[in-house]
Image (spheres, rainbow, N blue to C red):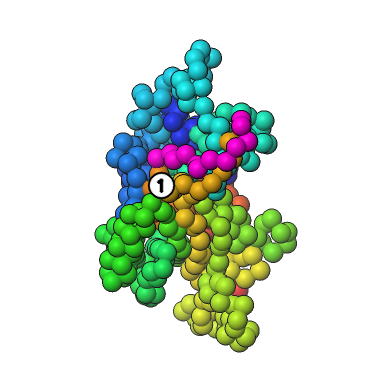
């Protein structure tokens, strides 16, 4: 499977095309839009979330509530487009730089300057429009489709915020359905009510100071069989592919599995997961410190992956930069922004992880229809049971 997205943050729409989804899969429009709405929630978001109420239209690949096997085309309209029809018009326009809202002052921490240098663009709006985190709406819609495929085989996904700035949530060993329930009720997507209040107060403090704050989010996936991914080539290792997908989310800078960076200070006896066997469970691990992966392949234990999100670089107390026209220093201009987008980033991460697992699932059990995939999957489970 593969997908492409297109569109700009202030353009008329975002478009995503998914290729390789099997036929005869039940398709829930409500679930796609539910994931889009989840992405827009979260304490610390800016005014744009009040303007945009994202919903996706399916304009290809689905008929009478089921996939056809053809490419699935998704469209997410930009409700704010009416205010940008001149600035973002595809036709040439006459007028001053002010009329075109030309951007010539790159913001630190954004793609502005690098993109301008790479593509030889003197209007940095051509960079920021596409590099904006708005594009993650399309990726969430794609992930929502992938989740429906995984759901056909009992694979469940949850996400939660572990840290915002200096406030860390208490780790709790909860069933995945309980994590989903509690985080949906929390403005900062945590299961720890004490930390929830502290995080919200911390965000308020940061916002009052004109600053921004990042954090750590965790994604848990249950029901994945052993053997997705492969050890035989570096680019077939599923943990590596998930790590690349997570890092590709705007503002994400680090990834860890299981106990993660703590492995660097512990002896091997406190890191590796002992292998056990029972007739009821087959092979399983005593612990899950490696986060569900060994040798680039799933072990059958829950996948536990975390991502670190840096603070959003658009600040209301701007940092210094350099004007690309005059080469003179200035204080970076402010575009509309959030003080904290960590809770929303948790939803984005869930869905990009879902996509990578769905791709690996299709590589392993691939077929053109959901019935063919199910037969392959059940045959494999029987093979594991006989092993």
Vertical placement of residue 144 versus 125, above or below: below
Determine which quarter of the picture holds residue 275: bottom right
Q: Is residue 312 left or right of residue 363?
A: left
Asked if the magenta segment contains residue 329, the reply would be yes
The main secondary structure of the magenta stretch is loop
Residue drawn 66% across the image and 32% down it: 119
Residue drawn 57% across the image and 28% down it: 123
Determine which quarter of the picture holds residue 57: top left
Vertical placement of residue 333 versus 354, above or below: above
Asked if the magenta segment contains residue 230, the reply would be no
Point out the image quarter for the N terminus: top right
**Towards the viewer: 78 or 182:** 78
Location of mark 1 (residue) = 316
Residue drawn 63% across the image and 41% down it: 114
Determine which quarter of the picture holds residue 337: top left
Number of residues whose C-alpha sits closer than 10 Å to that of mark 1, classed few (under 14), some (14–19) or many (20 or more) = many
Vertical placement of residue 163 versus 207, above or below: below
The residue range painted magenta reads 324-336
């Amino acid at each position: 499977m593969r997908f492409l997205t297109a569109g700009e943050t202030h353009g008329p729409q975002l478009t995503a095309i998914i290729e390789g989804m099997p036929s005869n899969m039940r398709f829930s429009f409500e679930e796609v839009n539910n994931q889009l709405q989840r992405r827009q929630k979260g304490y610390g978001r800016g005014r744009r979330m009040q303007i945009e109420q994202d919903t996706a239209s399916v304009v290809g690949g689905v008929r009478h509530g089921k996939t056809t096997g053809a490419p699935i085309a998704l469209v997410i309209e930009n409700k704010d487009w009416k205010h940008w029809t001149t600035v973002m018009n595809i036709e040439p326009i006459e007028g001053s730089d002010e009329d075109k809202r030309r951007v010539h002052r790159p913001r630190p921490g954004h793609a502005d300057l690098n993109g301008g240098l790479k593509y030889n663009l003197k209007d940095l709006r051509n960079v920021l429009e596409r590099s904006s985190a708005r594009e993650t709406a399309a990726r969430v819609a794609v992930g929502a489709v992938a989740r429906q495929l995984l759901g056909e085989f009992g694979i469940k996904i949850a996400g939660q915020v572990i840290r915002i700035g200096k406030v860390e949530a208490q780790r709790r060993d909860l069933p995945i359905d309980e994590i989903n329930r509690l985080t949906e009720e929390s403005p900062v997507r945590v299961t720890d009510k004490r930390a929830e209040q502290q995080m919200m107060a911390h965000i308020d403090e940061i916002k009052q100071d004109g600053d921004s704050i990042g954090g750590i989010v965790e994604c848990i996936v249950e029901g994945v069989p052993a053997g997705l991914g492969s050890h035989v080539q570096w680019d077939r290792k599923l943990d590596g592919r998930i790590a690349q997908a997570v890092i590709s989310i705007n503002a994400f800078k680090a990834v860890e599995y299981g106990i993660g960076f703590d492995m660097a200070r512990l002896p091997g006896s406190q890191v590796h997961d002992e292998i056990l066997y029972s007739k009821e469970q087959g092979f399983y691990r005593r612990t899950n410190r490696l986060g569900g992966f060994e040798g680039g392949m799933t072990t059958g234990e829950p996948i536990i992956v975390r991502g670190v999100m840096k603070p959003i670089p658009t600040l209301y107390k701007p940092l210094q930069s350099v004007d690309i026209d005059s080469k003179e220093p200035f204080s970076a201009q402010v575009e509309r922004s959030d003080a904290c987008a960590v809770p929303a980033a948790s939803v984005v991460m869930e869905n990009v992880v879902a996509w990578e697992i769905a791709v690996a699932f299709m590589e392993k059990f691939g077929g053109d229809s959901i019935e063919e995939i199910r037969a392959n999957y059940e045959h494999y489970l029987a093979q594991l049971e006989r092993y």
